[in-house]
Amino acid sequence: MKTSITSYSYSQLYKQGSFTLFDAMDHAVSIGADGFEFTELRMPEGKTKLEFAKELKEYADAKGLPIVAYAIGANFMAKDQEAEIARVKSEVDVAAALGCPTMRHDVTGGFPDWYQGVRTYGSILPILAKGCRAVTEYAAEKGVRTCSENHGYFFQEADRVIALIEAVNHVNYGVLCDFGNFLFADDDSAVAVSKVAPCTFHVHAKDFLFKPGQEAHPGSGWAESRGRNYLRATIIGHGVVPVRQNVRILKSAGYEGYITVEFEGLESPLNAIAIGLENLKNYINQ
C-alpha cells in the first residue's frame, strides 16, 4: 500500500486566497506522501480544465509525485441524465490529461423534486446504474477506471454501494472506500469496509469525533448522521474511526493501492495533514 493526499484537505488554505494547488503538491512532497489526488479542479482564470490538468501533471511529474485519482461530483438523477452523462464523460478526459488511473464520481444526493416514482433506493437503482455504466464504458477506452464513493448521505452505507456495483456489473467500475463516511449512515466502519473491500479501487482515510444523538448539539463544526448522531472531522488517529483496523482488513483482502489522507477538520491543515499522514504510514507498516 502507498499513501496520497487529496487536494480537498487544503480547503481552509485556498479560502485565504494565496495558497494554490501547486503549494498543496509541494507540501505533500515535503511530508513524504507517495502520491496526490485532485478534487474538482480550481481553475485559474482564462484556462480550460484540460489545459490546467496538463499543467498540473507537468508540475507533479517534475516533483516525482504521481497523480493517483481525480474526484468529481455527479448526479445521475438529474432530469436530463444524458446531459449529465456527457458532462461526466468530459471529466474522464480531464482525468486522462492528469495521467491518473482512477476517477471517482458521485451518484446522486437523493430523490429530486421531479421524481414521482416510489422513493426507495432499489426503485432508482437501474437509473443510477445506467449512468455509471455509460461513463465507465467510455472511461475504459481512455485507460481510466471509475468508482463511486460512499458519500452524500443517500449513497453512504456499504449495502447500497455493493448493490450499485452489482447493478453496473462492469470490471472497470468499483468503489472508493471512505473509512469515515460510513459513520454518516450510522454504519459500523470496519464491518462496512470488510463488505466493500473486494471491489475497492481507491481509499480515503478520514477520522471523526463522535457524540450520541441524544445529547445536545455540540455547536459549530459538528455535522449529523442520518440517525442524528453528531460527527466532527479531525486528524487521522484522533477520532473514533478504526483506521488501523480498516487498513488490516484491506490488506487481508489483497488491496495494494493508495490510501489517501482526507482532512476536513477544524485544526490547522498543514499540521493536521502531516500528523494524519504519519499515523497512516504507521498503520500501514504495522
Image (tube, rainbow, N blue to C red):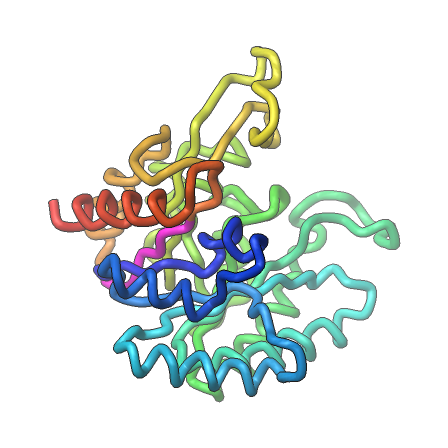
Q: Nearer the viewer, residue 160 or 56?
A: 56
Q: Quadrant of the C terminus?
A: top left
- The x and y percentages for residue 272 are 35, 43
* The residue stretch that appears in magenta: 255-262
In reply to whether residue 258 is colored magenta, the answer given is yes
Give the residue furthest to the left. Answer: 286
Question: Residue 284 vs residue 184: left or right?
Answer: left
x, y (%) of residue 253?
24, 53
In front: 38, or 145?
38
Q: Residue at x 22, y 60 (%)?
A: 32
Q: Is residue 13 left or right of residue 108?
A: left
Residue placed most toward the observer, 256 or 37: 37
**How many badges with numbers are in the image?**
0
Looking at the picture, does residue 1 appear above or below residue 141? above
x and y percentages locating residue 130 in the rendered image: 65, 69
Q: Is residue 255 visible?
A: no
Q: Is residue 123 one of those drawn in magenta? A: no
Q: Quadrant of residue 45?
A: bottom right
Query: Left or right of 196: which side holds 88?
Result: right
Task: Say which residue appears at 29% left-offset and 77% top-offset.
Answer: 63
